[in-house]
Image (cartoon, grey):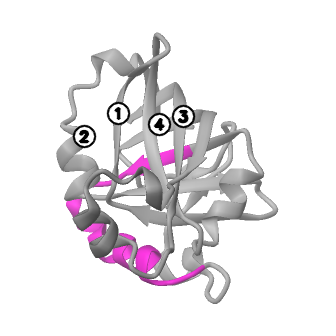
């Protein structure tokens, strides 16, 4: 895509605690014919099985889950702070009920294995490696269970291999 260059993920010096936890990201999957995106503020990056990976969490209730489940790849799109309003909208509204793209003015790009957004300044293209549903009996910190899952809307945990990192050039 014009405006992006592929970079070695190990050369990306972004603070992913800040990028995910405070600036948020859009998780996107699907095809040009049908895709969905959602805002995420939980997740992480690391190394697993000698691969550079992301850890993504998607609740059972999120429409995006069916797109990630149905795809081999998904993306994480990161934006500058000037897009917080658009990311907040994508987090508060379901693609089942509203056209998030029309409402936010974000421009999807379809030149990779999964859609991402032209306005992003960093994109991670991820191939699913592992998925597991959080289980209440696995919580060691019972306070977290009570605080975040009182309604039993548990997350699916995805481990995705970062197959490409795209930086705005």
Element marked by disc 1: strand
**Above-or-below relation of 138 to 84:** above
Mark 1 or mark 4: whose residue is earlier in sequence: 1
Is-magenta flag for residue 85?
yes
Cβ–Cβ under 8 Å for marks 1 and 4? no
Is residue 96 found left or right of 39 in the rendered image?
right
Residues under labels 3 and 4: Cα distance?
A: 10 Å
The numbered disc on residue 45 is: 1
Count of numbered marks? 4
Badge nearest the viewer, 1 or 4: 1
- Quadrant housing residue 89: bottom left
| Residue 129 location (% of width, % of height) | 62, 30
Q: Quadrant of the N terminus?
A: top right
The label number, if any, that marks residue 124 in the structure image: 4
The residue to which callout 3 is attached is 160
Quadrant for the C terminus, please: top left
Ranked by sequence position, the earlier of labels 3 and 2 is 2
Q: In this rendered view, identify the residue nearer to me: 110 or 127.
A: 127
Of the two numbered discs 3 and 4 on the same chain, state the one appearing first in sequence: 4
Tell me if residue 22 is in the magenta stretch. Answer: no
**Mark 4 touching mark 2, by CB under 8 A?**
no
Lower position in the chain sequence, tag 2 or tag 1: 2
Q: Are marks 2 and 1 in contact (CB under 8 Å)?
A: yes
Q: Nearer the viewer, residue 72 or 122?
A: 72
The quarter of the picture where residue 11 lies is: top left
How crowded is the residue under tag 3: few (<14 C-alpha within 10 Å), some, or many (20+)?
A: many
Q: What stretch of residues is rendered in magenta?
A: 75-94
Residue at x 66%, y 37% (from the top left corner): 112
């Amino acid at each position: 895509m014009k405006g992006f260059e592929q970079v070695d993920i190990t050369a990306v010096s972004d603070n992913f605690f800040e990028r995910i936890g405070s600036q948020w990201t859009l998780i996107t999957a699907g095809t040009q014919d049908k895709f969905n995106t959602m805002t995420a503020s939980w997740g992480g990056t690391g190394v697993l099985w000698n691969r550079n990976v992301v850890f993504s969490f998607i609740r059972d209730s999120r429409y995006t889950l069916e797109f990630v489940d149905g795809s081999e790849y998904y993306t994480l799109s990161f934006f500058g702070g000037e897009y917080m309003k658009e990311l907040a909208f994508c987090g508060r509204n379901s693609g089942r009920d509203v056209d998030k793209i029309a409402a936010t003015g974000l421009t999807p790009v379809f030149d990779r294995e999964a859609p991402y957004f032209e306005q992003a300044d960093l994109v991670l293209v991820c191939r699913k490696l592992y998925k597991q549903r959080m289980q209440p009996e696995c919580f060691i910190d019972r306070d977290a269970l009570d605080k975040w899952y009182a309604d039993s809307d548990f997350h699916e945990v995805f481990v995705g291999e970062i197959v490409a990192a795209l930086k705005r050039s």
